[in-house]
Amino acid sequence: MMKSTPVVGMQPELLKWARESIGKSPSDVAYALRRPVEEVESWERGDKAPTYVQLEKLAYEIYKRPIAVFFLPIPPLESNPQSDFRTLPEDDLRELLPDTYLHIRRARAYQFALRELLEGVSPNPIPMWHSVTLSEDLSVVQQAVQVRDCLGITLDEQTRCTDDEQALKQWRSSVERMGIFVFKNTFEQKSISGFCLSDDQFPVIYLNNSTTKTRQIFSLFHELTHLLLRMNGISKVEDTYIIGLPQREQKVERFCNALAAEILIPISDFRQQTHQISGNIENATETVFENLAARYSVSREAILRRFLDQKEVGTGFYERKAKEWASQQKQKTKGGNHYTTLNTYLSNKFSKEVFSRYHRQQITKYEASDYLGIKPKQFDYLERIKLRGIEA
């Protein structure tokens, strides 16, 4: 096949499917290829066809798909964010960036790999979602106690964490012990805090590593609540999106926020810690908020939200301070190589399952490397980093 001649035998509807599956418009594709938009549209109608060089760029650089998929008779069955996620308004779903689509696709690939690797059976005899049943109509306080008891981390253990990074590791490990696989990655779309994919055997939580550690901790429990309600979820850093949802979904999202807050900042302890300043919160010093945030390893905004829910501060004060703190807040990033970053992003439980099955000779090094998304020659080095617990 000449690389400059149009490709023969390709299905034009596959081009449209691939474009829409990543949330791009014909104009986006035309811009990336530096071709007229009319030309891209003619390929999708079948009037013309791209050259092999153009198809390579479409497949590998733009749509992130193998070339073979474009020669299938019909588009493969695949879910999409619009049908899978009901926890964002339709306008917000339409504004998801292609990078976010790719993260969702990657999370589904991890689920598929887990199902294949573990032969369709969860490694936990009694997964958390089988022993904890939640309801938006029952006491948030009592249900938060149930979740904490299941995770096995006491308030004393939580408050002994020396920093936000240690707290995130502790909570993430506790969630993974209960059969939920927690992945992370850096999102181009900074407004997305994370999402989850429900599954009866291999539920996945996927956090935006671009956000602060305290935000990741809160998002972890927000998405965990979605999973315990047996539903997919995707959420944003700012919760103003909730008012754009139908009434039922609004109730779910507010419940997820309330339960996450109660798990991380139990109201009984919070009242004990703040009884001396009750009634005078709006005049409290920054140190008061900082110390409370440090105690629970949450953000100052989460502490202030607790006061707002208790009607200790007004909405105007809350919004003004939250905006002020948000402008100050920046995610601290550490230097590190590709492998330490990958170690941070991969679910610890997932990677340990891969390494374990490799050493039991149930899978080859090539298969294990494919599961982890690395080259076989990189396998041993990543394993050493994982065993040493080095994170970026």
Image: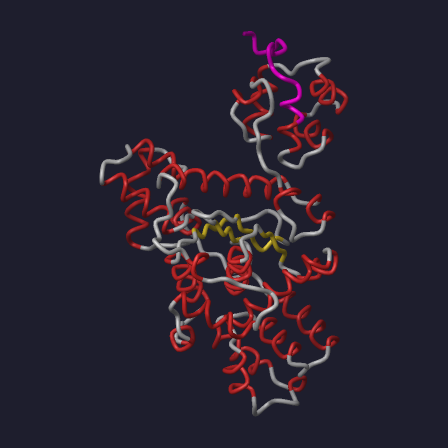
Along the line of sight, the residue nearer the viewer: 2 or 316: 316
User: Where is residue 327 drawn, in percent x and y?
Assistant: 65, 65
Say left or right for 265 vs 98. Answer: left
377 up-or-down from 146: above or below? above
* Residue in view at x 60 percent, y 25 percent: 75
216 up-or-down from 31: above or below? below
- Quadrant of the image for the N terminus? top right
Residue stretch in magenta: 1-16
* Occupied quadrant, residue 288: bottom right
Identify the residue at the far bottom of this view.
276
* Residue in view at x 31 percent, y 49 percent: 385
* Residue in view at x 60 percent, y 52 percent: 234
Residue 309 covered by magenta stretch: no
Identify the residue at the far left of this view.
360
Query: Mostly what secondary structure, the magenta segment?
Result: loop
223 up-or-down from 45: above or below? below
- Quadrant of the image for the C terminus? bottom left
Residue 3 covered by magenta stretch: yes
User: Where is residue 162 drawn, in percent x and y?
Assistant: 40, 72
Say left or right for 291 vs 342. Answer: right
